[in-house]
Image: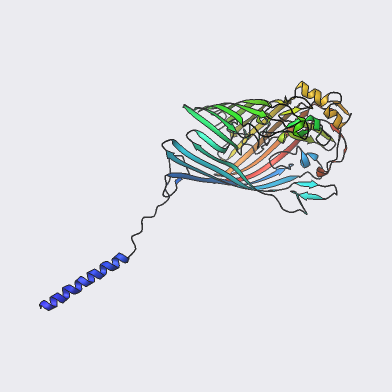
Amino acid sequence: MKLMKSLFLGSAAGLVAMSGAQAADLPLKAKAVEYVKVCSLYGAGFYYIPGTDTCIKLGGYIRTDMGINTNSIYRGNTDGAGGAQNRFSNAFTWRSRADLNIDTRTATEYGVVRTYMETVFSWTSGGYAGSATGATTYNGNPNGAVSGGQLGVYFAFIQFAGFTMGKAVSQFSAPWTEFPGKNIYTGLVGGGGTNTGVNQFTYTAEFGNGVSASVGVQDPSAYYQPGILNLATATAGNFGYGASAYGGTTAPDVVGQLRVDQAWGLFQASVAAHNNNPAYYGATQNTGGPGDKWGWAGQLALSIKNIPTGPGDTINIQGVYTNGATRYNIQDQASPAGGSTVFTGVTGVGFGFAPDSVFDTDGQLQLVSTWGIRGGFNHNWNPYWSSSVFGGYASVRYTGAAKTAMCGVGGTVRTALGTGITTCNPDYNIGQIGANLRWTPVKNLTFTTEAVYSMLDQKYAGVAHLAANNGIGKPGDDYTLKDQNTWTVMLRAQRNW
């Protein structure tokens, strides 16, 4: 009996030992799955990145635009092939675009650290050019080859302890940038732009009760250098204005802003200093050149909410003055674009050049002055329908010394364009007015139709003899100097997510 008991206990001990060994070989129990959690610290749409204390929000849109009577999807037929108003002008241009934006935020002992990026993928069709042989190219490629794809980086910046570092909207611009009337048209004059961001280093101080102030520097090379024109290089090909003669970028633009955000709306005052650094009088450094000059710009912007016309309605308005800093008025996507645009017609031409400054042989820089206004009224008819009216106006003025160099006896414009000019004056005005109607049948899906009319009030009279321009099918001929106008219609479907 004792023997049986000993065998039983020994067997049991062996089984226990074997079971313990097998249990040691089994994998550990898996941790609970870390589900994505809602982050309510920064508003709707944010979630915690699993395993971190960083919140992330993804967003974007898909958009399709069709522009009627335009070669540039968001501007009218004011120059180039569009302004030629002949067989090279598109009756319409189409664009499809996909947008992706990523916003991350992390709470730290120094405040919130934020990163933001927005990138777009666009496909645009349209844009024919001619050649001396009578052939055409499509978007720069022969035989109608497809070439309309484009990748763009709109924003890429870091915000930390009051600093904004990277590509963000200029602190000079109003919050609505070029869109006071929630417009599609991007070419409105009358104020700052850069709705796709400009490289900058800015500090913003919050004083409470909606009052803040910002000061910083930003890169002028991408969006704020419309041209310094060397009048000594004037030819019929550049319409007597001369070629652009910027030197290297030696100083960033200095920008400041004071802003008040309240329940009734917003008020903003902005200033900017912009350096004009010219190249040489001639082709090489031993020809010398004029000294650099600082230009400046000032802007006031006002947004009024809670107006009697209805809930959510707003009025946005701004006014600007510039001297040697033209792009703070005639912004980077405005017409005239780049400060070197000519409004053309079938047999007529109207000049609208807006550089920062000009200079003549052995002369000093002559800064160009401008002033302008821009505004819009936005009205909600009901939860599904809304509309806006909007417009812009700008005036460009050259100094007396500049006009003498350009228009005096034997002046560059007269010499380059012939003796048919009876009134020579590079000053001009430009006005734009438009309206749109938006339908939102379901949340975040909007259909928009918009029409814009643009007018150029130029100051030349007589006849200009222009050189041939095969790219837009224009022969060398005499063209009547006169005011110009154009219109465009935009159709858009956009789904935000």
Between 389 and 365, the residue placed more toward the observer is 365
Vertical order, 452 against 296 (above or below) = below
> Front-most of 443 and 190?
190
**Location of residue 313 (image quadrant):** top right
Q: Nearer the viewer, residue 301 or 154?
A: 154
Residue at the outermost front position: 286
Q: Is residue 34 left or right of residue 66?
A: left
Q: Where, by quadrant of the figure, is residue 180 drawn? A: top right
User: Is residue 321 among the parts visible in the rendering?
Assistant: no
Figure quadrant of residue 193: top right
Taking 17 as reference, is 142 above or below it?
Answer: above
Residue 24 position within the rendered picture, expressed as x and y whole percent measured from the top left: 30, 65
Q: Residue furthest left?
A: 1
What is the number of callouts on the image?
A: 0
Q: What colouring does the structure picture have?
A: rainbow
Along the viewing direction, whichever of 392 and 161 lies nearer the viewer: 161
Q: Residue at x 77, y 31 (%)?
A: 287
Classify residue 493 as left or right of residue 37: right
Residue 9: image location, x then y, percent: 16, 73
Inspect this view and state whether residue 338 appears: yes
- On screen, residue 271 above or below 197: above
Q: Position of residue 403 (x, y in %)?
A: 79, 24
On-image quarter of the N terminus: bottom left
- What residue appears at the point 76 percent right and 53 percent down from the top-left corner? 144
The percent coordinates of residue 450 (x first, y second) are: 67, 39
- Horizontal side, residue 418 vs residue 47: left or right: right
